Image: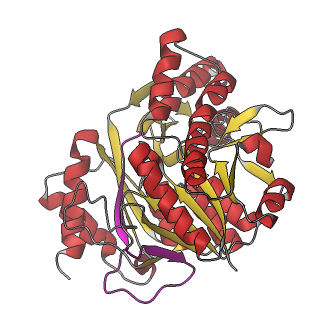
Amino acid sequence: MSLIVQKFGGSSVKDARRIRNVAGIIAETYLAGNDVLVVLSAQGDTTDDLIAKAAEINDHPSKREMDMLLSTGEQISIALCAMALESMGLSCVSLAGWQVGVRTSGVHSDARIKKIETERIQAELDQHRIVLVAGFQGVDRIGDVTTLGRGGSDTSAVALAAAFNADLCQIYTDVDGVFTTDPRIVSNARKLDEITYDEMLELASQGAQVLHNRSVELAKKFHVNLEVLSSLNRKPGTKVKEVTKVEKTNIAGVAKDTSIARIALIGLQHNPGVAFQVFDLLSKSGINVDVILQSIGRQDTKDITFTVHKKDMEEAEQILNDHREALKFDHIEMDDKMGKVSIVGAGLMSNCGVAAKMFEALYEAGINIQMINTSEIRVSVLLDEEDVNKAVKAIHAKFFDEI
């Protein structure tokens, strides 16, 4: 007997027909003799609808109350799916994050899982029940409901797989697996049979929406046997693993991210510790910074440009302006009409000219680059938001149409 964790995204459970389809997949796995632990996301656009309802009441609701509201979406999904399984005569139980004992940090809307208490789930599995867990949520040390950030149900699933040493963790979506880029933008994007943890982590971190980046971090750390596949057909998906066979191309895929904003601090004093002061202030407020560029300004000053998530732009501006006297900068410039396009692949480490090939594709497409950022297996460029899809198509064609 194997223990299999199955996670189903919002599009997989968006209506009654899809829920019955998901129940069929779960039942098939269960009736094959496996223990099954299921994690579900909120149905379809439920989370967006709840956010809209909050906006009708309060333009700036507290993050704590937003977590209380948003956590209800996943609870609806697990209850409905449990009802579908009950109608098939199968023994099951649905559990919210607090019932399971998913213990998290106290950072509302972006909490981190610290511990999973296994007793309740194990007791249910021992009775050979299918256990359905609400993804995306947990409780902090004082018992307040927290959420893990958008896409956090992936992280819930992988964390549960790690906690119970599951034989397999399957992430079901509405696509057949991990593609070389978003198939909605590039029609001839290719499905990958396998991809390394490191490549998948970079793709997820750079905007690919197949997996939550923190779920990949956990999978790599705890060696979780991970597969991404479609809930709409029974085709093999994409295996995410430590080492893959050598591919013909130097890159695994092209990712895009249009959720970023660029902030520039102009005229900072060119003194030691200024950069630390800036990013320490943002860090203490839970604001993540991505691409960073420092340049020499004028008259012994410097400019620091960096990117944050769009939702954090106004808060970051307020924090920096509140400390303007201490930081001694001239002014702030902001732009939320930005996008980031990245190429990712282990081949970047051992093959020269890969970045140049990317830049050539952008040049041929007449696209201007505003900032460049790299890691060992990634090259990212910041562009005008209106150029992002065009850039993805050009770069993908340059690397994959020539094979």
Number of marks: 0
Residue 93 lies, in percent from the top left, at: 70, 50
* Residue 179 quadrant: bottom left
In the picture, the quarter occupied by the N terminus is: bottom right
Q: Is residue 369 left or right of residue 233?
A: left
Residue drawn at 53 percent across, 54 percent down? 212
- Residue sitting farthest toward the bottom: 246
> Is 49 on the left or on the right of 255, as rendered?
right
| Residue found at x 78% / y 57% | 121
**What residue is drawn where x is 71% and y is 47%?**
112
Q: Is residue 376 visible?
A: no
- Quadrant where the C terminus sits is bottom left
Q: Nearer the viewer, residue 43 or 124?
A: 124
Is residue 401 placed above or below 212 in the rendered structure?
below
The answer to which quarter of the image holds residue 35 is bottom right
In this view, 386 is above or below 254: above
- 90 vs 401, left or right, is right
Q: Tell me, yes or no, whether the highlighted magenta stretch contains residue 253.
A: yes
Query: Does residue 39 appear in the picture of this structure?
Result: yes
Where is residue 365? Give x, y as percent: 13, 56
Image coords of residue 87 (percent x, y): 56, 51
Q: Give the magenta-colored segment's residue range.
A: 235-259
- Give whichever of 156, 118 is nearer the camera: 118
How far across and down, in percent of the image, does residue 126 sit?
A: 81, 66
